[in-house]
């Protein structure tokens, strides 16, 4: 997978450069000194979610073989052990919903995660059929969060989502997209509709959401899930072979992934960010971003200025 390979390259480059902060997060976590991952409330319900979750696009679209599934079982097991819980899926992601349902059932961890998926089709009945299929695949009687994927036929589906929420089939409802061009439409919906979540792209280099969308969600009491935090691996490629800035330690940043993720979650409008991975070491590294100090405004400025010079 392209973005995972790029991260390995970046980590290898840091090791070759002798970056003292690039510690193996899996080794440190095994010593029993895990800290609590930061949690934030879902504004509409008060339920608390860890700020780092897991995306499933590409990584969970796999077959039934043990060679493919065992690493993902390790990721889910470690995720639960470290206190993370949000898993985001979609019918668009091939077999991801089925794999998540199978593996969490095998691990007997179905009730330890916050299951988020999406409706991605056109037409009311088509949406109902697809959502029923998602429930079956994920082996759930109730989905924690159902979202309209990429705003496809969103007005039709949002009505169904509201009905299903009232009936107790889903606990939270939301909308999603992954492009800057969608942000103005997302903002309009956030301001005009009664929804629990909005999901969109945001990263240290792709900061369009900072113009007004993040503030709009915070002002309206809508929880925010962030996708594309690593820009599909482009951020790792940009820092390949470079050392972390000396001031990274001031914010308990031990890797490039943590720098990228801490920038995102240091914006208090963000509820959860969902980097995808099938590598348990990368998972532990990602979850480490939810521990320790976060950049203040001065630190966020340092990160922006440093990245702009890459």
Image (tube, rainbow, N blue to C red):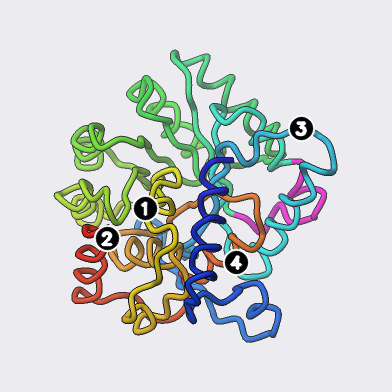
First in sequence: mark 3 vs mark 1: 3
| Mark pair 3, 1: CA separation | 32 Å
| Mark pair 2, 3: CA separation | 38 Å
First in sequence: mark 4 vs mark 2: 4
Q: Marks 1 and 4: in contact by CB < 8 Å?
A: no
Comparing labels 4 and 2, the label whose residue is closer to the camera: 2
Identified at 22% across, 60% down, the residue is: 309
Comparing labels 3 and 1, the label whose residue is closer to the camera: 1
Q: Marks 2 and 1: in contact by CB < 8 Å?
A: yes
Q: Which residue is mark 4?
A: 284
In which quadrant will I find the C terminus?
bottom left
Q: Marks 3 and 2: in contact by CB < 8 Å?
A: no
Mark 3 neighbour density, 10 Å: few (under 14) some (14–19) many (20 or more): few
Q: Secondary structure at mark 2?
A: helix
Numbered mark located on residue 63 in the image: 3
Q: Which residues are magenta?
A: 102-113
First in sequence: mark 4 vs mark 1: 1
On the picture, is 173 further left or further right than 168? Answer: left
Q: Secondary structure at mark 4?
A: helix
- On whether residue 110 falls in the magenta region, the answer is yes
First in sequence: mark 1 vs mark 2: 1
- On whether residue 51 falls in the magenta region, the answer is no
Q: Secondary structure at mark 1?
A: helix
Q: Which residue is mark 2?
A: 307
Mark 1 neighbour density, 10 Å: few (under 14) some (14–19) many (20 or more): few
Viewer-side residue, 92 vs 309: 309
User: Hey, which quadrant is residue 150 in on the image?
Assistant: top left
First in sequence: mark 2 vs mark 3: 3
**Image coords of residue 168 (percent x, y):** 54, 41
Mark 2 neighbour density, 10 Å: few (under 14) some (14–19) many (20 or more): some
Numbered mark located on residue 238 in the image: 1
């Amino acid at each position: 997978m392209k973005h995972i390979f790029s991260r390995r390259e970046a980590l290898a480059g840091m090791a070759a450069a002798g970056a003292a902060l690039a510690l193996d997060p899996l080794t440190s976590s095994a010593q029993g000194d895990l800290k609590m991952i930061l949690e934030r409330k879902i504004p509409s319900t008060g339920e608390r979610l860890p700020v780092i979750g897991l995306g499933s696009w590409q990584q969970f679209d796999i077959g039934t073989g043990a060679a493919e599934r065992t690493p993902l079982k390790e990721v889910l097991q470690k995720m639960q052990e470290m206190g993370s819980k949000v898993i985001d899926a979609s019918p668009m992601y091939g077999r991801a919903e089925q794999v998540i349902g199978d593996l969490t059932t095998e691990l007997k961890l179905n009730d330890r995660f916050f299951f988020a998926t999406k409706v991605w089709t056109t037409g009311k009945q088509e949406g109902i059929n697809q959502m029923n299929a998602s429930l079956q695949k994920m082996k759930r009687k109730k989905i924690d969060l159902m979202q309209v994927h990429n705003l496809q036929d969103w007005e039709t589906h949002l009505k169904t989502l509201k009905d299903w929420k009232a009936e107790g089939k889903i606990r939270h409802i939301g909308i999603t997209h992954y492009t800057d061009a969608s942000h103005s439409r997302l903002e309009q919906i956030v301001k005009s509709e009664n929804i629990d979540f909005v999901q969109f792209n945001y990263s240290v280099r792709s900061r369009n959401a900072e113009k007004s969308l993040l503030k709009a969600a915070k002002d309206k009491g809508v929880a925010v899930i962030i996708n594309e935090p690593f820009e599909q691996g482009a951020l790792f490629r940009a820092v390949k072979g470079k050392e972390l800035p000396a001031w990274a330690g001031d914010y308990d940043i031990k890797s490039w992934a943590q720098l990228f993720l801490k920038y995102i979650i240091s914006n208090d409008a963000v509820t959860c960010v969902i980097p995808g991975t099938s590598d348990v070491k990368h998972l532990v590294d990602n979850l480490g971003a939810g521990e320790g100090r976060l950049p203040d405004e001065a630190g966020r400025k340092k990160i922006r200025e440093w990245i702009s010079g890459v």
